[in-house]
Structures are given as C-alpha cells and as structure tokens.
Image (tube, rainbow, N blue to C red):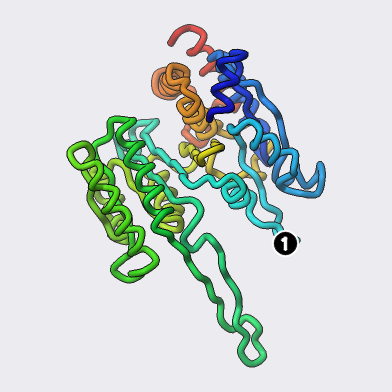
Amino acid sequence: MTTALTALHDSNKIPATLIPGDGIGPEIMDAVRLVLDALGAPFAWDVQQGGMAGIAAGGDPLPQATLDSIRRNGLALKGPLTTPVGGGYRSVNVRLREEFQLFANLRPAHTLVPGGRFENIDLVLVRENLEGLYVAFEHYIPFGDDPKAVGFSTGVNTRAGSERIVRYAFEHAVKLGRRKVTLVHKANVLKALTGVFLEAGRTVAVEYQGRIECDERIVDACAMQLVLNPWQFDVIVTTNLFGDILSDLIAGLVGGLGAAPGANIGENAAIFEAVHGSAPDIAGKGIANPTALLLAAGLMLDHAGLTDHARGLRKAIDAVLNQDKVRTGDLGGTASTTDYARAIVQRVTSGL
C-alpha cells in the first residue's frame, strides 16, 4: 500500500480503483459511495469496468484498463462480477488474484442482527488464495468412445506459500488482539498436499508461542464443530478449497453472504469486495442489501490506515440495524437500498 499511502500524504487523497460490477453491483456501489462520502473517506475514485460490463465495453470481462488502474493504485473496491458462461472465459476473480498475487483472502464474520440461530459470532477466516486445487491443473483422459472418461486434477501447495499465509493469519491475530489461530487441514488423508501446509503452519506457530495460542482441526471435524460450537474458534487459517467452503459456512452463521465482506491481499495490491453474486433477478429493483459491500469498504479503510473511519462506519451500520430498525427485505425490513444507505448517512452526519 505504499503507493496509496504516499498519495494520501501528498494530496490528502488516496487513489483507488472502483469497479461497480454487474447486476445489483452498480446500485449497491452507489449506496456505499454515498456513505463513504458522508464519512469523509479520502478516496479519489478511478471508475473502471469488469464482468459483463467489461464485455459490453471492450469484449473482455477484465479489461486491460481495469488491470492497469489496479496496478497503478494498489487498492480497489469492487462489486460482484459475472464471468460469462462459455466462450472460454476464466473466472474474473481468479484472474484478479493471479494477476496481482493476492495470496490472502480475509473473510471476517460478525453477528449484525441479534435473534438468529447463532448469537455473538466473531470469527475470522484466512484462506490461501493462489495454491491448492484451485491452480486448476486439469485435463481429461479419454477411454473408448468417451473423451472425458476420466477427469484429472493436480493440487499444489508449497511450503513457502503455506508459511506465508499462516504467518499472515498470525500477524492479523496479533494486530486485532485475537487469542487463537486454528490450522485447518486434511493431512490425515492428503498427506503431501495438505501435510506440507500443516508442517509449515506448525513451524510458524512456534514463532508466536506465548502471544497467540495455536490448535489444529481436520477440515470435516472443523465444519461440524463450527455448527455445534462456533464460539470455540477465533481465527481460522486454511488452504484454498477448504477456505472457500468454510468461509461460506461461516457466513451462514451470521445470516448469509449478504453480511459477508471479503478482502484479497497481496504484497503490492489489495482488492475488497462483497462475496455474494450479482443477483440479476433483483437488479434495478432498489431492494438489494449493500451491507456486505459496506463492510468490505470498512476493511479497505482499515487497510489504508483509516481506522477511525472504519470504526465509525461499523458503528453506524450497527445503530441503523439494531436501534433504528431500518433494514432491507432480506433482513426482515422494508427499506430500499437507498433508504438504508441514507439512514446510515444520517447516523454518520449526526455523530451517532
């Protein structure tokens, strides 16, 4: 984040790329910008396109101009992007992670509205973003008349990549004053692929003895225990595929993906996002919930060193949801996207 923070020092503005996204993306992004403006967040937005909007503009769901902007700014906030089905297009999100080596996927989950199945959830999942089975070294083996008789995939975990993600998880735990990191693996069966992750994790954990507790879980046991007793966990760190699955499970503990922000962190760039889809069935109806993208913006504020702004944003969201009872339909309310955003702006401008 050197580029962005230097720019803040020089001009009191942080250059950042903004990708509205597809479906409900533009309308929830408008809501987020309304709130960030009220907070006085000092971002100088460079608006770029991606997903279907990128296809419409230039035939590529991830245009070169968008990549150049992120590379230049080192910081981006993006709405949900749709990867077109067919046509040989790779996942836009995977391409972004690979292009900028965004090795850490940060997925916090915090109870926003009391009264659900689980109360007082406060977890952070750290997912390795570049390795594992998601390297997608895949091919088919033909047999007889069937050209796809056998599907073959190779996963790759490196010791260096495993140590990097585990160290990131421990450093994040230290920064936030957390108490424990849990290493999640499947080394009892995938002895090489996730064994190297577990070994690397144990090595890194020794460096934090006396500061951060460390324990281990096999991934299937972890999934069960997250449902039975999620409060035993604090920070979870795991490999790519397991992290993808467990992060959605954890989002379910706090009401679903509408309450789930995400951050993708690399050495030279960071991209913040709502992890839910583009929801084309409700696009343009003004009923989408921007909370996940607002919380992602909060992570972006933290990352840029604007912790007071981030704290104010989260307090305003909490006050609107739980004191003012202004909620969108998915949370049991009747507020439109804009009504909800304006209620948060009111809280911000009135000093809560």
Q: Quadrant of the C terminus?
A: top left
Residue 336 rendering spot, x and y as whole percentages: 59, 27
Look at 39% across and 23% down and name the residue there.
Answer: 322
Q: Which residue is mark 1?
A: 88
Residue 106 rendering spot, x and y as whole percentages: 44, 41
Look at 62% across and 13% down and name the residue there.
Answer: 11
Between 291 and 272, the residue placed more toward the observer is: 272
Between 330 and 45, the residue placed more toward the observer is: 45
Amino acid under label 1?
Answer: Gly
Camera sees residue 285: no
The single residue placed furthest to the top in the displayed view is: 350
Camera sees residue 188: yes
Q: Does residue 175 appear to the left or right of 312 in the view shown?
A: left
Q: Does residue 341 appear to the left or right of 184 in the view shown?
A: right
Residue 290 rendering spot, x and y as whole percentages: 55, 31
Quick check: 218 above or below 188?
above
Look at 75% across and 61% down and name the residue there.
Answer: 87
Look at 45% across and 55% down and name the residue there.
Answer: 240
Where disc 1 sits, the SS reads: loop
Q: Quadrant of residue 122?
A: top left
Residue 41 rendering spot, x and y as whole percentages: 55, 17
Q: Quadrant of residue 67?
A: top right
The single residue placed furthest to the left in the displayed view is: 210
Between 154 and 326, the residue placed more toward the observer is: 154
- The total number of labels drawn is 1
Quick check: 44 above or below 176?
above
